[in-house]
Amino acid sequence: MIAFSRKPPVWVLGLIPLAAFAIALWVGRFGVHWGDTFRVLFGLEGPSDVFRALILRVRLPRVLAAACVGANLSVVGASFQGLFRNPLVDSRILGVSSGAAFGAALALSFTSHSLWVQAGAYTFALAAIGLVMMIGMRFGSSALVLVIGGILIGALFNSFLGLIKYVADPLSTLPTITYWLLGGLNGTQWSDLPLLLTVSGLGLNFFILLRWRLNLLTMSDTEAQALGVRIRGVRNAIVAVGTLMIAASVALAGTIGWVGLVIPHVARAWVGPDHGRLIPVSAMLGATTVILLDAVARTALPSEIPLGILTGLLGVPAFLVLFLRFLRARGEAT
């Protein structure tokens, strides 16, 4: 087990996402005094109408979306790692992200309206998991069958996505599809949030309520069944709810990798493998990570950096460090 030698106190967990939230509202291309930011949030007089519109209509919905996306990816990644007993599993293992990417690309081939793009991504994400579940029902819903089914369905939708990109107009549609696939939260509006907030809230509560069953599912199926867990029903419920959370996130933010893989390992190193603590800590760390990365994405360069690029640049070395710590803990590396 990887563990930090000096763990921050528990109360820091609540301050970290709050601090990230405040920083993301404060920083940006247009400077806003931190005092004016809090005056706007609490409805006090002082800031101009322009600053109020900037905070309330542009930055606030974007930060809320970033928090939900980060929490969803991290919680589902942590849950799937326990469910499939594999530390290399993340939310993309069941082909949901590939289905969502194809649905968004298909919608972008006809229109750039965000509602249709989100609807296409959401629809085909659910179609992907539906096909995986059909494979599971036919051949038994074991973890191995679901993983293999997810890999196959993901490869199928990736092929469909390649076909869409091949026939897309290279001067207009193809760049739009490519940019969307890189991930990002630019253009997020309040109208985009109701579905995401609802799915995120219900999904996070679901996984917290199921925390002890997740602990049992990390054991073998025989042991978990002997302790009273209905393996197939619980596994299917976890996969279904996790899929809804990932579909809602990908439909709005595009494909964002590494968060669902790295953050659960950081949380596990912090609080241990008990899902009663792992789920909420993963949610808070995931929300904090995406909020801060999104702030960097919109401020670091004159043009916005796609969020998926930043998560990859930071996720690869972060996972390498965690993996080396794991090897050292087992005595397999020096």
Image (cartoon, grey):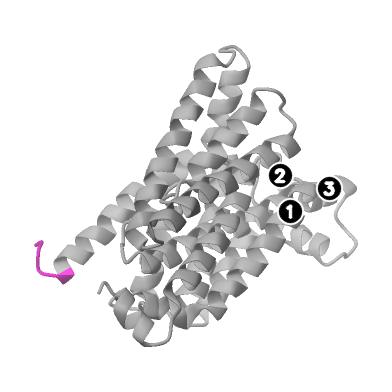
At x 70%, y 23%, the residue is: 110
Gap between marks 2 and 1 measured at Cα: 8 Å
Which residue is the site of mark 3? 53
Which SS does the magenta portion mostly show? loop
Q: Is residue 77 magenta?
A: no
Which picture quadrant has residue 16? bottom right
Q: Amino acid at mark 2?
A: Thr
Identify the residue under disc 2. Answer: 188
Q: Which residue is nearer to you in this view: 63 or 131?
A: 131
Residue occupied by mark 1: 193
Residue farthest along the front direction in this orientation: 138
96 left or right of 215 in image: right
Q: Counting other residues with Cα less than 10 Å from the Cα at mark 1, is it few (<14), some (14-19), or many (20 or more)?
A: some
| 174 displayed left or right of 83 | right
Could you give the CA–CA distance between mark 3 and mark 2, rounded to whole angstroms?
14 Å
Residue that appears at 10% across and 69% down: 331
Residue at the image point whose x is 68% and y is 56% from the top: 196
Alpha carbon separation for disc pair 1 and 3:
17 Å
Q: Which residues are magenta?
A: 329-334
Q: Nearer the viewer, mark 2 or mark 1?
A: 1
Residue 274: give x, y in percent of width and height: 40, 80
- Of the residues tagged 3 and 2, which is closer to the observer? 2
Question: Which quadrant does the N terminus fall into?
Answer: bottom left
Which amino acid is tagged 3?
A: Ala
